[in-house]
Amino acid sequence: MNDTAPKMTGPELDIDKVRSDFPILQRTVHGKPLVYFDTAASAQRPLPVIEAVDNFYRNHNANIHRGVHTLSQEATDHHEQARAKVAGFINAPSDQEIVFTRGATESINLVAYSFLRPRLQPGDEILITWMEHHSNIVPWQFLCEETGASLKVVPMNQRGELEMDALADMLTERVKLLGVVQVSNALGTVNPVAEICAMARKKEIPVLVDGAQATPHQAVDVQALGCDFYCFSGHKMYGPTGIGVLWGRYEHLQAMTPYQGGGEMIRHVTFEKSEFNDAPGKFEAGTPNIAGAIGLGAAVDYLQGLGMDKVAAWEARLLAYGTERLAQVEGFRMIGTAANKAGVMSFVLGDIHANDVGTLVDLHGVAIRTGHHCAMPVVQYFGLPATARASLGIYNTMEEIDTLAEALEKTNAMF
Ligand code: PMP
């Protein structure tokens, strides 16, 4: 565990200490203190992450795996330590089940092309849910076009909760993979993923869980979830961009063929034929994002230093406060009111276009996201062109929610 991670002073996050770890929170926007409510798009980075990347480039930079010289060995050690940290973070049974990718999107594409494509026949089905991010929709559409399989979508209700009875009915023997998001980036819904995996497992249907919005906010245990694949991105959990993870059961990873060829993923090459490395190496062709992996390892240390239970508890308090406080703003309507929600507040404000809301609150230093949040079917479901979204992170405070509420009230006054 990282010594620089803030220590807990009690049952709650030491929020002042946490905030002091994020240098960007010192800056102003339009002359106002930055209030960052766009963590679901990309989180800010704490000093230990920035320093880990800086330290790598200053003191250990070299290519990994291939070198006998000291720097290369140090770089390799740091890179592989990061893999072990990530494995521990999601309770993977083995480091060898952790494949470093560019992010959740690449992880899903890897499963699509290496795992599922060779198994698909015309008439097969891929099952996803209505609240998936485009990253968990489009790769499957490509496969369906290529193979004659079809994409089926589990419906949701007006609160943004999955229709579990429909899901049960749709898990037929035609389904060759179920892709499900653990926490919806557009609605904040936390899906009952362990229950869903158990339902699929009874039918021997493999499950890929998109954990991009889960790993920053709650403890994840892939063994307890009972999934087959789990993916996430470093930049959503306070780590660098350009690094992410695919976890897969080792028997799946070993049975899969690589989808990119190149250096490092091979054991032996002749012009006639090449033999591949074991997983995870065979999926990590070319020089990887070494500094990114090391930064992700530092982000894992940081979050574990805080305690994921405390992170989840703090964000739950913020969400409860935000839900109540923002509801007092005239015209405010929350989109996504599931009973089990994480720190995402998507909303509309009267009939003011979301982009205008985003632009106007930015003048008060408040960063929110507007649009379809890469989940167009969700906004279409609610009959909206777009929503505004305030998403929460470990550094947010109740006072910042007040600032957002006041900025929204001032926005209202302009229309
Ligand atoms: N899934 C979900 C739920 C997400 O929120 C995102 C990012 N918005 C992704 C997948 C894709 O992540 P990335 O762009 O880091 O690959």
Image (cartoon, rainbow, N blue to C red):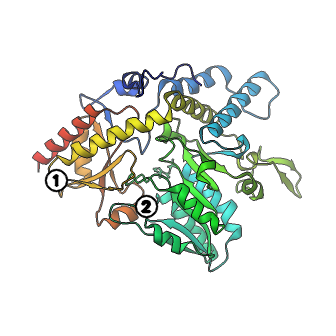
x and y percent of residue 350 in the render? 17, 56
Camera-nearest residue between 293 and 17: 17
Residue type indicated by callout 1: Gly
x and y percent of residue 275 in the render? 85, 53
Q: Residue 377 — which label?
A: none
Q: Residue at x 67, y 37 (%)?
A: 83
x and y percent of residue 27 in the render? 33, 26
Residue type indicated by callout 2: Met
Is 186 left, or right, of 288 in this rendering? left
Q: Residue 331 — which label?
A: 1
Residue 183, compared with residue 167, is above or below; it is above
Q: Residue at x 73, y 43 (%)?
A: 96
Answer few, some or many: residues within 10 Å of disc 1's Cα (few below 14, many 20 plus, some between 14 and 19). Answer: some
Is 49 left, or right, of 389 in this rendering? right
Distance from the alpha carbon under mark 2 to that under mark 1: 25 Å
> Residue under circle 2?
131
Q: Residue at x 52, y 35 (%)?
A: 239
Answer few, some or many: residues within 10 Å of disc 2's Cα (few below 14, many 20 plus, some between 14 and 19). Answer: many
x and y percent of residue 348 in the render? 24, 54
> How many marks on residues?
2
In which quadrant is the N terminus drawn?
top right
Secondary structure category for the residue under label 1: loop
